[in-house]
Image: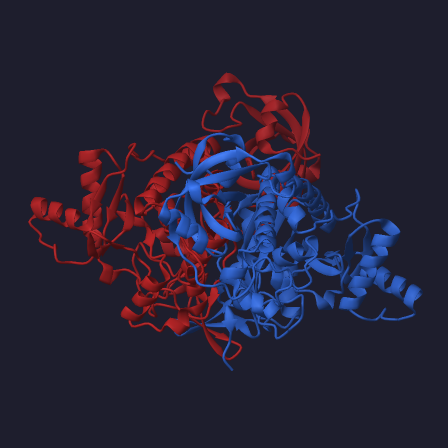
Chain colours: A red, B blue
Amino acid sequence: MRILTTETTKKVGEEVMLKGWVNARRDMGKVTFLDLRDRSGVVQIVCFPADLDEQSLAIAKEARGEWVLEIRGIVNKRGVKQINPNLATGEVEVLAKEIQVLAKAEALPLDLAEEKIGLDVHLDNLPLTLRAPKWRALFKIQSEIVEAFRAFLRGQGFTEFQCPKIVGGSTEGGANVFNIDYFGHKAFLAQSPQFYKQIMTGVFERVFTVGNVYRAEEHATTRHINEYTSMDLEMAMIKDHTDVMKLETEFLRYLLEYLKKTVSEELKACNYEEPLLPKEIPVFTLREVQKLIKKHTKVDHIAEPDLEPNEERWICEYAKKELASDFVFVTHYPTAKRPMYTYPDEKDPETTKSFDLLFKGVEITTGGQRIHDYQQLLGNIKKWGLKPENFSFYLEAFKYGMPPEGGLAIGLERLTARLLGVENVKEATLFPRDLNRIDLPLSS
Amino acid sequence: MRILTTETTKKVGEEVMLKGWVNARRDMGKVTFLDLRDRSGVVQIVCFPADLDEQSLAIAKEARGEWVLEIRGIVNKRGVKQINPNLATGEVEVLAKEIQVLAKAEALPLDLAEEKIGLDVHLDNLPLTLRAPKWRALFKIQSEIVEAFRAFLRGQGFTEFQCPKIVGGSTEGGANVFNIDYFGHKAFLAQSPQFYKQIMTGVFERVFTVGNVYRAEEHATTRHINEYTSMDLEMAMIKDHTDVMKLETEFLRYLLEYLKKTVSEELKACNYEEPLLPKEIPVFTLREVQKLIKKHTKVDHIAEPDLEPNEERWICEYAKKELASDFVFVTHYPTAKRPMYTYPDEKDPETTKSFDLLFKGVEITTGGQRIHDYQQLLGNIKKWGLKPENFSFYLEAFKYGMPPEGGLAIGLERLTARLLGVENVKEATLFPRDLNRIDLPLSS
């Protein structure tokens, strides 16, 4: 019966059977050490020639990185001086008695322990490089971020739903969509689950969905990818957009605690520093941010409808320094720059009850209250120059009773990248698709 | 402070505030009854003219199905004769004191309480019809099926990952894929996460992913949809395909218990009958099924490489009657009919260590052991007439150490449909895409 490497610490003196990948082999003359990796962690295997049959010994001598071995041996406590405090199993080692090969590996083209593998080399070799400690830790954490999102929302009465990605029209108005040939009809890849989650608030009142979304943007920045994971929620019976912001703040607090509980080792491996999350995240209107920037930098962008990336970084640095927060809400983006379903502020209808959440310099969330009144929504569709008949399915939800509602979307890869201090969002995307790459570089 | 309708039972004698949709209004001369629905359930509101101001009374008289109301009132215990045993809140009612409109609804084009809305009418009006009790219950259960899948696998040491859906090649060999224009390059919608989950077993050993997959099949049957939700898992360090079958059996047992605990009310609303799941699900090879069919029906399909739909139904009926099981595993499909990565049985290399799981007449899972040896896989790719260079990314996982591994995929919508006795898989798909429909019928 196989046990996991981390279980060896509870089996001192016992014979065990392990299966795993060779992380490293160290030949020290008479004795050979193997670091064996499985899904739980790593343990040191000690191979003395006297303990092993000829075949096992040959494997111990020949095995290279990423060979997969099945090893029988005795768990021994290490001497005090041999204890490795950086390893969860560092107080024990396994004295090999028998070794079998489950799979050989060709000579590795790169050293997985190497910290500085270039981004392109990394992306070209993901099936191999993802096995390195840093990436295993990062994507384990990412998997727990998604779980935390779901667990938190389920606790708040939200229902999950599965959202289609093939759509007949584009959510946001037309640009930046990938086209699909759908049995001779024109179809698109969804830019967001926006319409469906709004429809579903009519069904379950509070809903969420996690899935891929698509932007055919020809951007080559450290913030953009063309297929990413959107964590979406939508909730009815709200007062206004601030209810959604409050929920997101609570989620973030839940998330930080959850990660410490579930993936503390992985956080350490990523040199995680817990972000500053005050009781209330600072909130500025777009105009207030622009005024602050003008006051402090003399740059006057007060007439601009949005923040530039360097301005997003500026307000984040300001909030960190002055308000001890790594997060900043920016609200009231102009009506003209937001989608037709965005709720205008009654006090200033040129601005909307919308918000972005900035985290360490990058926008990770867009959200807000939506227009729920059927006639108002219909009016806006026309005002935006769109055709109501293209939205008839969506509009049916509002025609038949939709209360005040709003929601938000969190970009999973951006959140992961900012949380773990990774520069390029592609490094926080398991198999990134960009302008030049689908797994491998696209031929030109 | 708003409370949920189901919380009224704990608030007898207290004043409460409720928000929800009007399920039904009954005018009984002096008194008007409203059934108010929110995400938790339904409660009866009693409107006496003497209790209400003029405006509230007008709303009580005018409100129709799907109006959204905010109601203040006093929770009263019902008289013994008035108790409604079919309603979770059936022992109480709320005496309305004040009513406000959160949203009006136009006159409904159909009666949501009606059991027999035709499929096309239903699909044309999903934003409305999904609010009916049957569909709310069905998709609530579906959401819990996904949660059960994840909870079970997390408990078994599996790690979740996010899988891309834009791919550069087709997994299964070429046919039935949707084409995407990817910045002037040819790309496809993934038919399955197969290659990625195999790659990820090299990283996390045991992985799962839940997401949309695509089949450009021109089938118009009750079993096919063109975009569906695949619940995928893949696990390394297996003995053979039977380890995967064992895990699926354990999952199904976990699922049935989980649903009884979490959505018992919804199961009742769907007239759920718990399926027969014996300790061991019956297993037949394809050939054994064909021999049984020949013996009992005289139809000789022993040379055929697959079962026909009516044969799948036959063996399920047989297993139910003779072996008290609603589930049947069929193994050893021919090598020639399975994808190039399928593991051939050493004892009979013309057949594979693959399986289907049939449930009440329909295949809900395909799974099996995969070829993990790099040279063998490379050889098969060539044998299948495919180009190794098109699979270089995938192959890298096997080049650098992959132990014996296997996995399976469960079609969420088919599982839901069979579990809840729904005839057409489209009824178990939230927003089904088929040959003729993306939300609304495609124009010809």
**Residue B245 placement, left or right of A248:** right
Q: Residue furthest bottom?
A: B444
How many labels were placed on the picture? 0
Q: Position of residue A223 (x, y in %)?
A: 31, 54
Can residue A113 be seen here? The reply is no
Q: Position of residue B386 (x, y in %)?
A: 60, 71
Return the residue nearer the eye: A32 or B276.
B276
The structure residue drawn at horizontal position 60% and vertical position 27%, both measured from the top left corner, is A8
Q: Position of residue B88 (x, y in %)?
A: 60, 40
**Residue A217 placement, left or right of A60:** left
Q: Considering the image in quadrants, where does the N terminus of chain B appear?
A: top left
Q: Position of residue B198 (x, y in %)?
A: 58, 53
Q: Is residue A298 above or below residue A148?
A: below
**Residue B164 placement, left or right of B117:** left
Q: Residue furthest top?
A: A80
Can residue A382 be seen here? The reply is yes
**Residue A214 placement, left or right of B149:** left
Residue B130 quadrant: bottom right
Return the residue nearer the eye: A43 or B312.
B312
Residue A56 quadrant: top right
Return the residue nearer the eye: A30 or B119.
B119
The structure residue drawn at horizontal position 38% and vertical position 57%, both measured from the top left corner, is A120
Return the residue nearer the eye: B100 or B403.
B100
